[in-house]
């Protein structure tokens, strides 16, 4: 039985709701603090093992007890130190400031492998204070707690730990700093320097207790001389000086950013690591279907910096991402992961219009073969298509990731001058599931795949193409593979002449 009484959990009011890890997963009873939103319930449903009821306090106490037990057995801390660490971890989670990665919640790692698999993430916007600054002392202490927890989880065997932070974009919005600005990069550099300094200082304290295994770095990258956040530059310098004064270090590496998993959603972080903001709205699956909701970054910007919200949430070029990566990289032990897709551009709050579920001309909602699909587009000031993105409600994570990568590659091509007509010729009438009846688009009643519907819709909207025939019901059957020349190859080979959409259309019958 997880220990609740006598801890910070005692007296925390919980609300129960039914939630699933994804739209196809069975629903389970989830208990969370009253103020936490539905996305957090879905995240906890994904994190907690099993399929039965789950509450945040009891799920957290399972891994907190594991941290305490392993740390005491390895001599990382005594009983009093274990109790203090446990309360610190509870406080981080309750304030949504930090938590270990999904593998710890699911108990998927063993002590000998924890160094390579286990991570701890800190949610940067949760450290904002009402005066417009940062709780720097609290952040440094959170870094130290995370290092102690990761050391304990590895039973003192790890030489490389993975401490990282998330939602830099949300922090910058709260501070009123555009992502592509020198001030934003200075803040990011200061955060990275403070993270490394605080982590290595704690590694030095563990080395003094358990024995040093690594020498202290003799050369340091220079932290920023000043930032717009009061005290950040001084705190980063002090943390690095404290690390340099240690007799030795316990670990070779400590700071590494990673792609997001369900833990970021549980904490309320909207982006992983140093990724830019994801626009003003996000798609949410509701009982009535997909709906658009403001992002937390948008709400924060509107509340604190309403006059500059558009500037803070607008799309950023790849050069801005690369400049941010170069700014923080000297203080990381592992290079930041490459982004999968560009963020959606800023757009006004969507408004539904009939007969299609179209939001402000940028989001289309249909059902293809019983699967909900949302196609989002972005245009320049002349109405030219610049970007596409998909939201799929019932597909697995691997399929969604492939579709995200595909949409990203198409967006890059559009922005570099590849004609939309070329994409239509290449991907209209491609065959794969889901396929079949299209609900919500009266102009396209059937489609052989999601890509078939999407590119024929784009051809209608942006090219005025009305010469593309509808596939028959037989063409849309799951086992309808067509002739070999009608199916695009899976390898990057040149398409035969008969395999172009124009050639494939010759085999289609016009039906009513």
Image (cartoon, rainbow, N blue to C red):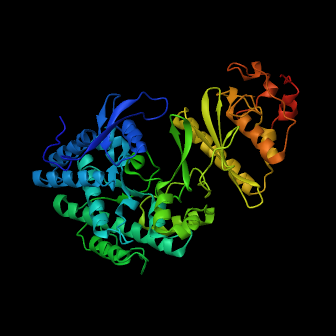
Looking at the image, residue 147 lies above or below residue 219: above
Quadrant of the image occupied by residue 135: bottom left
Q: Return the x and y of residue 331 as percentages of the image width and height.
A: 42, 67
Residue 474 in view, yes or no: yes
Outermost residue toward the bottom in this view? 225
Report the side of 165 relative to 452 (left or right).
left
Viewer-nearest residue: 453 or 356:
356
Report the side of 208 relative to 468 (left or right).
left
Q: Return the x and y of residue 400 as percentages of the image width and height.
A: 57, 39
Q: Return the x and y of residue 18 as percentages of the image width and height.
A: 38, 33
Viewer-nearest residue: 325 or 269:
269
Residue 262 in view, yes or no: no
Outermost residue toward the front in this view? 354
Report the side of 381 relative to 114 (left or right).
right
Which residue is found at the position 28% from the left and 42% from the top?
14
Quarter of the figure with the N terminus: top left
Which residue is found at the position 43% from the left and 35% from the top?
21
Looking at the image, residue 108 lies above or below residue 94: above
Viewer-nearest residue: 198 or 10:
10
Quarter of the figure with the C terminus: top right
Which residue is found at the position 46% from the left and 61% from the top?
300
Q: How many marks?
A: 0
Q: Return the x and y of residue 214 as percentages of the image width and height.
A: 29, 62
């Amino acid at each position: 039985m997880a220990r609740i009484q006598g801890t910070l959990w005692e007296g925390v009011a919980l609300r129960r709701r039914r939630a699933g890890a994804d739209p196809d997963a069975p629903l389970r009873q989830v208990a969370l603090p009253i103020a936490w939103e539905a996305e957090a319930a879905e995240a906890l449903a994904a994190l907690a093992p099993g399929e039965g009821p789950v509450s945040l306090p009891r799920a957290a106490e399972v891994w907190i007890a594991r941290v305490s037990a392993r740390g005491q057995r390895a001599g990382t801390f005594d009983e009093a130190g274990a109790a203090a660490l446990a309360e610190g971890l509870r406080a981080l989670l309750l304030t949504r400031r930090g938590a270990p990665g999904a593998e710890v919640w699911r108990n998927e790692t063993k002590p000998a492998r924890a160094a390579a698999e286990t991570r701890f993430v800190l949610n940067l916007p949760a450290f904002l204070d009402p005066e417009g600054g940062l709780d720097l002392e609290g952040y440094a202490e959170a870094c130290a707690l995370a290092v102690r927890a990761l050391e304990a989880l590895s039973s003192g065997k790890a030489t490389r730990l993975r401490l990282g932070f998330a939602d830099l974009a949300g922090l910058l919005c709260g501070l009123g700093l555009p992502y592509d600005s020198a001030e934003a990069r200075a803040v990011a550099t200061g955060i990275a320097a403070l993270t490394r300094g605080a982590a290595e200082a704690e590694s030095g304290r563990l080395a003094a207790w358990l024995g040093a295994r690594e020498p202290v770095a003799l050369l340091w990258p220079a932290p920023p001389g000043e930032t717009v956040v009061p005290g950040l530059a001084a705190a980063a310098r002090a943390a690095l000086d404290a690390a340099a004064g240690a007799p030795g270090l316990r670990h070779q590496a400590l700071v590494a950013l990673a792609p997001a998993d369900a833990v970021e959603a549980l904490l309320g972080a909207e982006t992983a690591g140093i990724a830019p903001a994801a626009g003003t709205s996000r798609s949410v699956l509701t009982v009535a279907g997909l709906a658009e909701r403001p992002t937390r970054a948008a709400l924060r910007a509107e509340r604190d910096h309403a006059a500059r919200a558009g500037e803070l949430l607008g799309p950023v070029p790849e050069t801005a991402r690369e400049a941010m990566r170069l700014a923080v990289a000297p203080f990381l032990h592992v290079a930041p992961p490459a982004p999968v897709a560009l963020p959606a551009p800023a757009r006004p709050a969507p408004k539904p219009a009939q007969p299609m579920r179209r939001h402000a001309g940028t989001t289309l909602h249909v059902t293809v073969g019983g699967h909900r699909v949302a196609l989002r587009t972005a245009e320049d000031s002349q109405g030219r298509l610049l970007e596409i993105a998909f939201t799929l409600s019932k597909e697995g994570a691997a399929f969604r990731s492939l579709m995200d990568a595909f949409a990203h590659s198409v967006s890059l091509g559009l922005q570099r001058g590849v004609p939309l007509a070329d994409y239509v010729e290449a991907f209209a009438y491609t065959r794969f599931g889901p396929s079949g009846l299209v609900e919500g688009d009266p102009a396209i009643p059937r489609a052989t795949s999601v890509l078939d519907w999407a590119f024929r819709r784009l051809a209608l909207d942006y090219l005025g193409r009305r010469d593309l025939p509808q596939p028959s019901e037989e063409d849309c059957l799951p086992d309808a593979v067509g002739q070999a020349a009608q199916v695009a190859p899976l390898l990057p080979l040149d398409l035969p002449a008969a395999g172009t959409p124009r050639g494939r259309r010759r085999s289609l019958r016009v039906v009513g």
